[in-house]
Amino acid sequence: MTNIPTWVLFALGSAFFAGLTTFFGKLGVHGINSNFATFIRTLVVLWAIGGLLTWRGEWQRLSQLSVSTWGFLVISGITTGLSWLCYFRALQLGPISGVASLDKLSLAFALLLGILFLGEPLRWQVMIGSALIIAGSLIFLIP
């Protein structure tokens, strides 16, 4: 039996919890402003991660972070917030099947950025897998 790399297990966990996020998010945005729902979700995430850091003793001094680390984390935080705002509004307006399908186009954007700016290899598996994900995401738009 082949050992499964730890990163694969965490990635599968991420996908599983993202699916639950979509399901519970759809239920949660009913009858509430989607931006306010995102705010509540953000507070819960902040509380949970703060608790985890405390429990595991993983707090670090902010002064130890480099300027580039700060910059990239701030930009990532901004883009996460914008993504969540768009996602919750889309869930409020549309079906889970459509929102979740189109949201998975984020994979294509991430792969493209990794290839263009991080020098990640464009292997045939990446090309075929990306094409299938893009096709699967966009097929929902066919009337």
Image: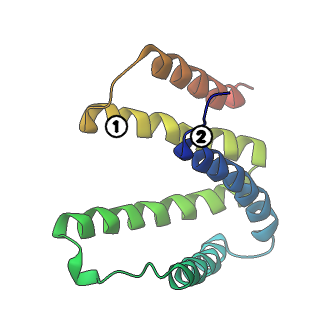
The residue carrying pointer 2 sits among few (fewer than 14), some (14 to 19) or many (20 or more) residues within 10 Å by Cα, namely some
- Badge 1 element: helix
Q: Which mark is residue 114?
A: 1
Q: Nearer the viewer, residue 47 or 59?
A: 59
Vertical relation: 124 (above or below) 14: above
Q: Find disc 2 in the rendering and name its residue.
A: 104
Please indicate whether residue 40 sits to the left or right of residue 119 in the image. Answer: right
Report x, y in % for residue 131: 54, 20
Q: Tell me the amino acid under the disc marked 1.
A: Gly
Report x, y in % for residue 85: 56, 64
Report x, y in % for residue 80: 47, 62
Report x, y in % for residue 46: 54, 80
- Badge 2 element: loop
Please indicate whether residue 72 sits to the left or right of residue 45 in the image. Answer: left
Q: Tell me the amino acid under the disc marked 2.
A: Lys
Mark found first going from the N terminus, 2 or 1: 2
- The residue lying at 55 percent from left, 77 percent from top is 49
